[in-house]
Each structure stands twice: as structure tokens, then as C-alpha cells.
Amino acid sequence: MKRASGPAHHTKFSSRISPFLQRQVSRNSGIGRIVGGIVSLVCAGFAFIDTVMTGLLGAFFESGFFSASSLFLLIVTGALAILGGILIKTGQERKKLVREYYEYGRVAGTAEYLEISKLARAMGESRETVLNNLEKMMSEELLPAAWFDRQKTTLMLTERMYNEYLQLERERQEQEAAASLDQMKKDSSAADAAAAAAVDELPEDLRPRPEDAKLPPEARKIVEEGILYMGRIRAFNDEIGDEEVSAQLTQLETTMKRILDQIRKDPSSAPNLRRLMVYYLPTTMKLLQAYKELDSQTFQGENIVSTRHEIRDALGTINVAFENLLDSLFQDMAWDISSDISVMKTMMAQDGLTGDRIRKAAQGSAQPSAQPAGQADSGKEYTEGYTEGYTEGYSETGSGSAAAAAAQPAASEEQEQGIRLTFGE
């Protein structure tokens, strides 16, 4: 809705000549601009002639440079010429607009609104020209209280008429909203009925489960729609005879079933499937429908064969994408498990339950409190056999172990068994 600039109450009907002629404008409006433009052009002409007559043009190349004074005079002359041209043009446009203003007012008479098409026919002008002139009149305050309707087919010239239009427009919008709501309810009921009929036609193994009704709304909607898509995939599989396509559709149905099973287990992952439901699956159905129609053609031309081949390749890509989507649904679970393992390892290490801490404790208990120097060296060699590689290290230091066994008191049988238990030997 376009409204004339300026509040409507500033222009009262009693001060108007008519509803259209809202301002008394001089019919000579614009003459002043034209006269000013002519004066500017005359001054520019005289300045240019004076410059030529006095020989200032010869000074442009003094000492190889332009004369600054001559250049300045020429710039001023050019500016005056441009200003004069602009004034003359705008003055003529204003004079013409005022003339059209009074002509439109004569045709409008005392009418409080004008149909643009009728005004154009009466003036012998195109609708676009009349509309453009009216918009200019509104922008230049010739029509300070005028309004177009929503489609710009009618110009309202009084506040009373404009308020009536607004009331009718509100009623129309309310009626459209009510009709739209009724239609949405009808469409929803029809869609529910169609969905129920489609579910009834599904094979037994694809029908909704009783526990699906307990899912959150978004997850339940995805599961219900996914089941219907699975039914369509199986129907296409039954109708298409191509073994390669049939195998891909079987794989696709299996992946879809696993996706829906995961949604049942973890409804919070439902938002991750929005694009699957609103784009990928509908597009896949479109491709399968096209393949079915092409496959049923008795004449298999080059274009048909090529298109079928492209759809087969696309089905392979779709299967890979759906499997990746299924894998992404387990991402949160993988993160949680990894976090749990990390925390558990940290706590075990702090409590001394990991291999390094137990091994050090066992090694400490195997050492005697005091040993001769030779015996200490042998014992060190003995324990290093365990810490450096368990069985391998033990065999490498066998001589040291034998010497230690002969030179020092043997470890108790219980300690030896404890060491073997620790390292799994």
C-alpha cells in the first residue's frame, strides 16, 4: 500500500477545489526554472565567447602547462551550461505535470476514487504513463492525501474512502485466512486418511509398532513417514525387474529399517534426519518413478538407456550416503563411550590398579633391604629382565638371574607367584 507523503489531516476537503485537486497550484509552475535555465545558458555562452575573443585559449600551453585561470573559467562556463540544461528540463517536466494534474482533476470531477485504467482511457494515455504521473504528483505534494490500493488499480482521494477500503481489506484478509484454515484442515484430514490407507496396505513386517505411539512428536513423525517410504521402496522393488536395481533397493530398505530402529532407541537424533525426510527420500522416490516408467518402455532408445544407467549409478551413491547417515547417528554414542573409557583409565591409574603401578609394587617387595654390592648388581639385572620385556627380557638376563639366586636369599614362593600373576606368566 502506497500512501502520499504527509498526514491526511493536513489537507481538509473543504479547502480543496475537488477531491482530486487537493492543492491550488499555479498553471505557470515550472516557468521560473525554465527562465533560470535560459539565463544560465546565456551566461555560459557569453563567458565562452569572451574567453575565445580575448585569446585566453592561447594561454593553455604557456610554458608547456595549462593556464590555471583559463581552465577555471572554462570549468565555470561548463557548470553554468549544465545547470541551465537541468533547470530547463525540470521546469518543463514540472509544467507538464501541473498541466496533467488539472486535466486529471477535470476528468475525476467530484469522485472520491479513480480507477487507473478508466482514467488512462479518458486521457488517451497508457496505464503505465498515468500511474507514473500520479506517483510523481504524490511525491511532489500535488496529491498530499491520496492512496493506492494493494494492486495499484485504484487511487483513493478522501480519508473516508481510504478507511472504507482498509475495512474491506481487513475483512477480505480474515475471510482468506479462515478459508485457508478450513482448507488446511481438509487437507490434513485427507492426508491422515491417505496415510492410514497407505499403512493398511503395507506388508506386515513394515507396519508401525505399538511402541511408536510413545515416541516424541518429531521422532514419531519421522518413523511414520519413514515406514511409508519403505513401503514405496518395496513396491518399486517388486515392480522393477532389473536385478542390479532390485539388489540396491533391498539394501536401501535394510538401511532405512536400521535408521528407524535407531530413532526408536534414541529419539533425540531425530532432528539429524530432517533433510533425509524433506529432500533425499522424496528425490529418491522421483528417480525410482522415472526408472520404472523408462523400464516399462518397449523401445529402449539411446536416451532411455543412458538415463536408466545414470539412475542405477545414483542409487549406488544414495545407498552409500544413507549408510553414512546411519553411522553418524552413533556418533554421540561413540563419544560417550570414548569419554567413559578415558575417565575409567584415569581413575584406575590414580587408584594404583593399572599394570605400571602393580609392577612397581611387586618389584619393590622382591628386593631385600640390604645386599652386598655384587648381589645388588645381580638383583638389578634380574628385575630389569621383567621390566624390559617380560619373557624376552627374562631369557636375556638368565645368567644374572642364576647368579642372584646363588648369591642372595631367594624370594619367597608367594612373592614369586605374585610377580608371575602380575605379568601374566
Image: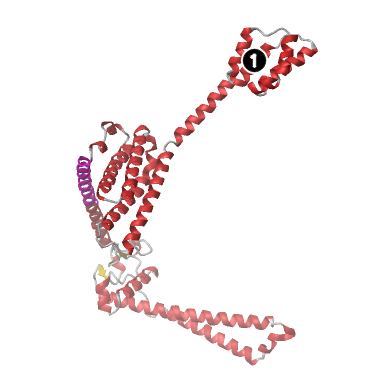
Quadrant showing the N terminus: bottom left
Please check the rendered image and state whether residue 194 is part of the magenta-colored stretch, yes or no: yes
Indicate the secondary structure of the residue bearing disc 1.
helix
Q: Main secondary structure of the magenta part?
A: helix
Residue 82 x/y as whole percent: 53, 80
| Amino acid on which the number 1 mark rests in the picture | Ala
Q: Which residue is mark 1?
A: 361
Q: Residue at x 51, y 84 (%)?
A: 39
**Can residue 32 be spotted in the picture?**
no
Q: Which residues lie in the magenta part?
A: 177-202
Q: Is residue 291 magenta?
A: no
- Give the vertical position of 69 relative to 133 (above or below): below
Q: Is residue 201 left or right of residue 227?
A: left
- Depth check: give the residue in front, 329 or 66: 329
Packing grade of label 1 (10 A; few <14, some 14-19, many >=20) is: few
Is 353 placed left or right of 395 in the picture? left
Residue at image x 77%, y 10%? Answer: 371
From what the image shows, is residue 271 above or below residue 37? above
Residue 210, image x and y in percent? 25, 31
* Residue 347 seen in render: yes
